[in-house]
Image (tube, rainbow, N blue to C red):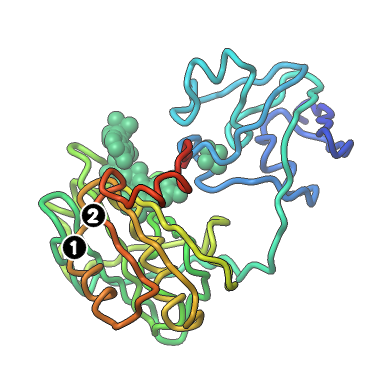
């Protein structure tokens, strides 16, 4: 039996028991504590928390989503951290929404279309009897051999049938993306798991500012698609920092006659008034 330790979360003063071979995040989830998280692979930094006392270890080495400076300041990534003593952790809790069932499904590549020299729009088709419920902003994992998985944001709005759109950037030598660009063919099967993540669009009346860089535009495209369908009077501002796949996507939206949608080619070119409103550090 693996050793167990107690983790106390502040300021909530809730405690859970954690086995040494289970990440603190996984144990917290089992204990019903809604901690923020997204990739569960040490990359995105969403599960960052401050370790106030105790010792953790990362079995696969320091996670890429935590800088040495953050480590020095006492931050840990709970999705990778294994407790090696009792811990006191300062973490925020999130408001949970009713989540759709997480499913593992086969999908077929039906279309691939270059959006830029290194970004591909990938259209996957799910079995028609197995729809995937998700919310705009969420992502899915492509399951690879050997238990490896890669995460991709869904770029289409929900309820658009059995096809899913992903925007995939080629990473030279990447275990998944190099094969996707060079050798996988239309018709190939990919196993996916989803929906995952808590990045979501919330209906409302307040203006929304969307800021994206590169394929970070994908979840925003899903949200904009949903907003166009539902929040017909809401003001939406879209800014992007790097070349956006096919600028025409934005042109298409701006051409819908919706004066509320304003696009700007880059944050640097945004109107001065808006820059004052939006200035600050954006962490992903
Ligand atoms: C929540 C979430 C959502 C994501 N959504 C998308 C998305 O919509 N579109 C998308 O293209 N990717 C997305 N990613 C990244 C994606 O999951 C993979 O990490 C990426 O496609 C690389 O996979 P690979 O197997 O080809 O490369 P790997 O074999 O994993 O990596 C090969 C090498 O490239 C480095 N590397 C990995 N990713 C990057 C990167 N992004 N930039 C620079 N170097 C890198 C690795 O450190 C490694 O050295 C998302 C990741 C997360 C956590
Ligand atoms: S959930 Fe992404 S780093 Fe932990």
Compared with 71, 221 (above or below) is below
In front: mark 2 or mark 1? 2
Q: Nearer the viewer, residue 276 or 245?
A: 276
Q: Nearer the viewer, residue 68 or 281?
A: 281
Question: SS at mark 2?
Answer: loop
Q: Which residue is mark 2?
A: 265
Q: Quadrant of ligand 2?
A: top right
Question: SS at mark 1?
Answer: loop
Residue 173 left/right relative to 223: left
What residue is shown at x 19% (from left), y 72% (from top)? 111
What residue is shown at x 46% (from left), y 47% (from top)? 278
Quadrant showing the N terminus: top right
In the figure, residue 18 lies in which quadrant? Answer: top right
What residue is shown at x 22% (from left), y 64% (from top)? 121
x and y, in percent, of residue 161 in the image: 39, 85
Residue 94 left/right relative to 266: right
x and y, in percent, of residue 192 in the image: 41, 62
Query: What is the residue that sits farthest to the front in this orientation?
Result: 273
Looking at mark 2, is its residue's CB closer than 8 Å to ligand 1?
no
Q: Nearer the viewer, residue 78 or 125?
A: 78
Residue 240 left/right relative to 106: left
x and y, in percent, of residue 17 in the image: 83, 35
In the figure, residue 81 lies in which quadrant? Answer: top right
Which dot marks residue 49? none
Q: Are marks 2 and 1 in contact (CB under 8 Å)?
A: yes
Q: How many marks?
A: 2
Residue 4 left/right relative to 224: right
Q: Which residue is mark 1?
A: 247
x and y, in percent, of residue 32 in the image: 79, 52
What residue is shown at x 26% (from left), y 54% (from top)? 168
């Amino acid at each position: 039996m693996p050793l167990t330790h107690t983790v106390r979360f502040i300021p909530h003063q809730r405690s859970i028991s954690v086995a040494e071979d289970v990440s603190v995040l996984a144990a917290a989830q089992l204990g019903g504590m809604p901690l923020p998280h997204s990739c569960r692979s040490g990359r995105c930094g969403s599960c960052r928390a401050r370790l106030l006392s105790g010792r953790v270890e990362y079995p696969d080495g320091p996670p890429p989503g935590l800088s040495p400076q953050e480590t020095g300041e006492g931050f840990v990534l709970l999705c990778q951290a294994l407790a090696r003593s009792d811990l006191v952790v300062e973490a925020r809790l999130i408001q949970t929404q009713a989540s759709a069932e997480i499913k593992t499904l086969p999908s077929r590549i039906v279309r691939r279309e270059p959006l830029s020299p290194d970004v591909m729009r990938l259209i996957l088709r799910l079995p028609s009897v197995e729809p995937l419920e998700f919310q705009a902003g969420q992502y899915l994992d492509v399951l690879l051999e050997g238990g490896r998985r890669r995460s991709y944001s869904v770029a289409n709005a929900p309820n658009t049938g059995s096809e899913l759109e992903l925007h995939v950037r080629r990473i030279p030598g990447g275990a998944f993306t190099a094969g996707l660009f060079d050798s996988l063919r239309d018709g190939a099967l990919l196993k996916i798991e989803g929906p995952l993540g808590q990045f979501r669009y919330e209906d409302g009346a307040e203006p929304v500012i969307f800021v994206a860089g590169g394929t970070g535009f994908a979840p925003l495209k899903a949200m904009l698609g949903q907003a166009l369908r539902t929040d017909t009077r809401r003001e939406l501002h879209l800014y992007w920092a790097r070349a956006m796949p096919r600028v025409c996507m934005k042109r298409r939206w701006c051409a819908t006659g919706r004066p509320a949608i304003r696009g700007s080619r880059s944050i640097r070119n945004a109107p001065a008034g808006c820059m004052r409103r939006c200035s600050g550090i954006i962490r992903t």
